[in-house]
Image: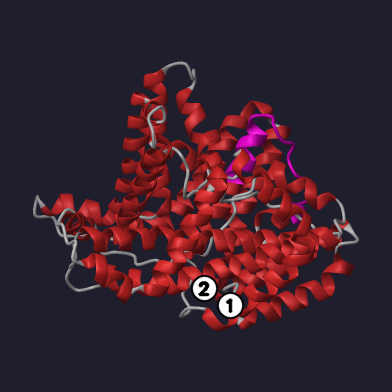
Amino acid sequence: MDFDSLEFFVFLGLFFLFWPLARRNNTVRWTFLVAMSLGFYAWGYWRYLPVLLGTGLVDYLSALGMERWPHQKKKLLWASMAANLGMLGFFKYSDFFLMNLNTVTALFGVKPLPYLHLELPLGISFYTFESMSYTIDVYRGRFKPIRNVLKFYAFLSLFIRLAAGPIVRAAQFIPQLDEPRRPNTVALWVGLRLIVYGFVKKLVIADNIAEAVDASFNALHVSGGTLHWTMIALFTAVQIYCDFSGYSDIARGLGKWMGFDLPVNFNHPFGAATITKAWMRWHMSLVSWLRDYVYYPLAGNLRNETKNNIAMSVTMLASGFWHGASWTFVIWGAWNAFFLWIERATKWPDRVRRFPGGGIFRSVVTALTMIYGAIWFRAGHVDRATEIFVHLLSPDFGSLLSLPKQYPFELLLVAFVVSRGIYFQSATGTKFKAFRTLRAKTRFYTEPFELAALIAIIVFLRGPGHAFVYFQF
């Protein structure tokens, strides 16, 4: 059930019709959230409800067991990890491992094993990480086990973030389930603003750009040179950003209407001064999860630079593999790890900043690193990505005039997104102080007209419908 479907709006209407009554009592509130969330999930993925409920039950019981039998904590943690990673690996990575196994065994004349062709359960990569973080935090003594199973599933299955996050920790969200949180007028307005912004990002920007991206990546033969593929790579990065951050904004906005606060997942990554800062603003809930549960345990003593770089590389490879069962995603993770390592080793952003135009130069290099990396993210196959990079190195400056004619609206949308990223990167400076002050004073009067205009833009300029990109992860 997509956020932009008629079915979802009917579902929302039913939810908010009964929510003011259901939220008054703890048991009723948790039961209502679980029932509606499982109904949302069952709409298109009812076959995989046992996966969600089963792995969740393992984690719920494991956490309670850690409290009751503390001397068995490590075994119970491993049971939880095995259940979560086992299910994730089975559904998401079975054919990937079979493909690589068949490639190796074919060298020895062994008959290939058949592929499973399993459908990926919606949101499994997201709720698996949420559930794992819960048992890990209980194991570390940072969170008390949840005794009420309905309360646990209200945390794990909440429909607004079930399909594609943000990835929420138990300590962040479960306390919000303990009281009837009634949103005030400000929260309702902020929620509306987030929802409208989210639909503009998804329906107007991402879906319109997707046509050009799909046409280039799905073409039978790769064509075009430097300018063409730089533009397509830029389109791809902006499409992924607007598609995913649009979903996150809608989820956060609906959360505001329900009285819940979900974490910010994107913070204007375009225009970031360094690759490190760009990653701190991109899919922030996943990055912070990997930092706390992969990077820090591996790095140990943060003063050991070699160990830090190894931990960072493993973390980025894990990030790539989390996104999909393909070598292109692993290479995408390695791509980012390599440039992060160069940045750490040489400190080049700080060095070039001292020169005239150095600040702009480092932002451009950072942006190009992220943009060209999107080719690995989108290509699907290593051979296709390699062929694209070969064409990328083929100068075609004749496209300088033809591309604006071919993609005028798409370029306008991309320019808007990039300019906003640059603005928010620079908005802390004194040059923008007067504008920020004026904006704060007039926002109460101008914002209703702005949102009305954006809603009109959504209605009249929305692109062809596309499923959310991160539903496939």
Q: Nearer the viewer, residue 75 or 425?
A: 425
Residue 101 % position (x, y): 23, 51
223 relative position to 14: left or right: left
Is residue 452 within the magenta segment? no
Tags 2 and 1 touching, CB below 8 Å: yes
Q: Is residue 150 magenta?
A: yes
Q: Quadrant of the N terminus?
A: bottom right
- Regarding residue 243, the answer to whether it shows in the image is yes
**Residue tagged by mark 1?**
457
Picture quadrant of residue 186: bottom right
Q: Nearer the viewer, residue 427 or 130?
A: 427
Q: Observer-nearest residue: 28 or 377?
A: 377
Is 210 above or below relative to 288? below
Which circle, 2 or 1, is nearer the viewer? 1
First in sequence, mark 2 or 1: give its number: 2
Identify the residue shown where x is 46% and y is 39%. Answer: 273
Q: Amino acid at mark 2?
A: Val
Pinpoint residue 109: horizontal percent, then vertical percent: 9, 55
Region of the chain picked out in magenta, as a range: 131-151
Whether residue 30 is visible here, answered yes or no, is: no
Q: Residue at x 70, y 81 (%)?
A: 10
Residue behind mark 2: 204
Work out which quarter of the rendered image holds the C terminus and state it: bottom left
Q: Is residue 58 left or right of residue 300?
A: right
Vertical comparison of 59 with 249: above or below: above
Helix, strand or loop at mark 2: helix
Q: In which image quadrant can residue 54 be found?
A: bottom right
- C-alpha gap between disc 2 and disc 1: 8 Å
